[in-house]
Amino acid sequence: MDAIFLQVLNGLDKGGAYALIALGLTLVFGTLGVVNFAHGALFMLGAFCAVSVQKVLTISTKVRDESITFFEAYKEVPILEAKFPVVGGFIVDYSVPFSILLAIPFMLLVGLVMERGLIRHFYKRPHADQILVTFGLAIVIQEIVKHYFGASPIPQTAPDIVSGSANIGALVGLGDNVIYPWWRLIYLGFSLSIIGAVFAFLQFTTFGMVVRAGMQDREMVGLLGIDIQRRFTIVFGLAAVVAGLAGVMYTPIYPPDYNLGMDFLVLSFVVVVVGGMGSLGGAVLAGFLLGLVQSFASMTEVKSIIPGMDQIIIYLVAVIVLLVRPRGLMGRKGVMED
Amino acid sequence: MENTVLHVADVHKSFAGLHALSDIDLSVREGETHAIIGPNGAGKSTLLNVCIGRLKPDSGHVVFDGENLTGKQPHEINQLGVVRVFQTPEIFPELSLLENVMIPILAKRDGSFKLRWFRRFSSEKTARIEAEHLLSDLGMETLIRTDAGSLSRGDKRRLELAMGLAQKPRLLLLDEPTAGMARHDTNATIELLKRIKAGGMTKVIIEHDMHVVFSLADRISVLAGGRIICQGTPEEVKNDPRVKEAYLGEEQV
Amino acid sequence: MNKFSAISDWVLLFAFAAAVYSMPIWLEPLGADYPDLMQRFAIFGLFAIGYNILFGLTGYLSFGHAAFLGIGSYTAVWSFKLLTMNVVPAIMFSMLVTALFAVVIGFISLRRSGIYFSILTLAFAQMSYKLAYSVLTPITNGETGLQLTLSDARVLDAAAGIEVTRSLPVTNFFGIKMSGMPGFYFCATVLVIGFFISLRIFRSPFGAMLRGIKSNQTRMAYTGLNTKPYLLWAFIISGMYAGVAGGLMAVTDPLAGAERMQWTASGEVVLMTILGGVGTLLGPFIGAAVIKYFENILSAYNTTSLTQVFDFVPEALQPIVVDVVSLFVGSGWHLTLGLMFMITVIFLPGGIMEGVRRIGSIFSRKKPTAAITSTPSASENASGA
């Protein structure tokens, strides 16, 4: 029971990341009709926003190490912390959450530039061309990051107060054996609230209404005299921000390297396809579902029966879903069926 | 009574509760040219799509020469000899006219699949001569090396017709064969279809142009609101009051 | 016209063969005449030519062909380990085993088309990659990669009385060692054979049917063709090409690693095909050669050598220039690759062959009548140019 509960949490957690990336991917595909292979790179860029913020905040200076008394020892301390021990230390400790403040404008800018500069010219091109050009772009982004940050993963730390584990078993009455990292719980809550925010935005604003209408019938919305072009740009920017935020918050869970985007891209495409191309609800549902499936497949009990199951289960599920329900779990008729 | 080749029996088809076809009973006899006419939205194209397996009827079935077509794959129906010429030209735009016509000829000859790698496409002599012959029959002999995509709409329709005829069908289904053609092209097409008729090919034609219908059809079925309201020779149909009612003001019969 | 194009195909084949075999001569001024690089030209050229049979003729964009490359390599190394160091059985086994995998993967993936097909192939490739790293370690030797050892069985070699005592054995073609130039000539021969088969497929009714599928698949079905077997054969054939290419990689260097199967490797073969010209006969090989050539040159640079190159730049600017340029060379070579990818897709979707044809048409515009009569057909022209 305890183990199952843990796996459920684990799965929801992973699922949250998948769902966030897949959400943006679907949004872009549904409105702009563009298959964006550079979406994973946006996730990775978000993660490196956190890395940059941490790097800047922790530019260090040497100070006397007071704990060593019998000779003059120095230790490296972030300038911020040395100058303003209380506030500075607090900011350095909270560098990941603070990165969000940088990530939102930065990712928005990246998204807008990408849409205006490149994606826009590919609306009418075949999907194969869209895949190829964004694939090229993903390589470019990833190589630039590699050039400036190196190839090895850069670990990030969660704020001290939540860096430990929660005795979640006691909270839900399952005994003391179920402990789970705080930050991962926060990530789950974070992804749920972002997903909620995106859906609320689409549901309750006029802008969202137009976007939803555009996902149903793009030409019709254009015919109504709505400047669909500008809205597309904003939708793309929004998707970039969502992917970026997912990346920022993911850094304490998994140290980011330049290749992070590619790993997640393949997975999130699988998620989108399983959920049904162009269905937002499907993307979220499939994200959590695949997260859960993967998490259960990595239990030792399962692995002892079918070794390697955890490695391939997601792809296996995707293959089965595509063959049994070609449109995905919640896909609509007529989307990408050429 | 002459042989019935195509028998549409009791076919129903509805889209989202809307009855597109109901109680359709239709017999096409060997060698005849059977025209299906009717006002817009009467269900003519739906009927044709049911016949070639693009749509599945909700109930009833379509029998061709003793074989039930319902539920068969499009290519299987084609191989039985039922060939459709589309209303919106379905061609291979990137290929030359010659290739466009040769592909159906080879498909007819080789069946669904034959792996001939070590043969040259261009040295398939009989097929090529046949294709060239057909194209010049339709007045397109000067265009055989052109890409089909660059043709005018009327020429694309004629190419489609050539592709259909290339398969020597036992039953040819023509969906408005002259729509979008200039007058003299229309007349040329009528002449061609008359020649085929002399050869004894069974045809079902959907057509708006009454001139075309009355110069080709042996029998006519009138479709309105998804039902066949009248069936008979051109003379009989012309004088049927129900037809006049269905067409009220739309067409001078 | 018939005879003309039949002859011109033979001319094309011989010209191609001559160009490939004479690479050591004409690549010398480019500084690319050493065997290792030329072997790569031939191997990746073969890979791309095979990929083109699927993508170029049918338009189905597979993102999983690197899996076949890897499978081919593993099979060849196992053949070296278990049977003999002779390369012929190794290549044969690579081809057959890959074909088996291609049948299964193709049969399932081809039930869908468009982007779904791409994702399915990608999923299969990722599965193979992950499995090669984890559960299949007994077969693939995981991260270390599959290597020859002194204690390998080599049943056939042992039966023939060939003993290995001190150093690892070398792959051979009935006694001729497959390292250096002989290795290149072997790869080149396989490449020429592969090109010949591809040429015949392009010109055959089978090829015409594939192009028909790319042009209008729905119409094919209403023409009485079941398109699935055609597509499956195209998939299997292109998979076998990839398998043979993988086998050749093992021939020139008997080591197989899972990184060969990563999906970025699949992306690379797509780029080669597109850069050269999708659906053309020569394009994929040219694309592969261009990419491997630039990879070789650009990845050799490092900061020190760049500083030497930009010696003439004022000292204050030098670090900036070097920094910017170093983005694109050395280990940053992939950035250049990505840019090439984008530029090709944006500005020249037809690839190098399209560019050549455009330039050619500027010259032929002076005598348009001659150009039309000597052109078999527009599409044949595109593929034969």
Image (spheres, coloured by chain):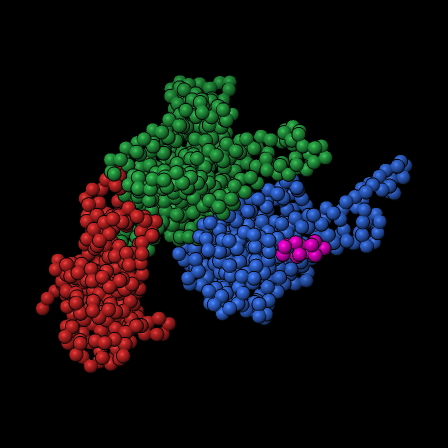
**Residue A332 visible in the picture:** yes
Residue drawn at x 62%, y 36% is C325
Residue drawn at x 53%, y 34% is C295
Query: Going by the image, does C98 lie left or right of A47?
Result: left
Colour green maps to chain:
C
**Above-or-below relation of A227 to C233:** below
Image quarter where the C terminus of chain C lies is top left
Query: Which tint was used for chain B?
Result: red
Query: Going by the image, does A194 lie left or right of C87?
Result: right
Q: Where is residue C195 shown, x and y percent of the image?
A: 36, 34
Q: Where is residue C187 shown, x and y percent of the image?
A: 41, 28
Image quarter where the N terminus of chain C lies is top left
Residue drawn at x 48%, y 64% is A218
Query: Going by the image, does A229 lie left or right of C232?
Result: right
- Residue range highlighted in magenta: A98-109
Colour blue maps to chain:
A
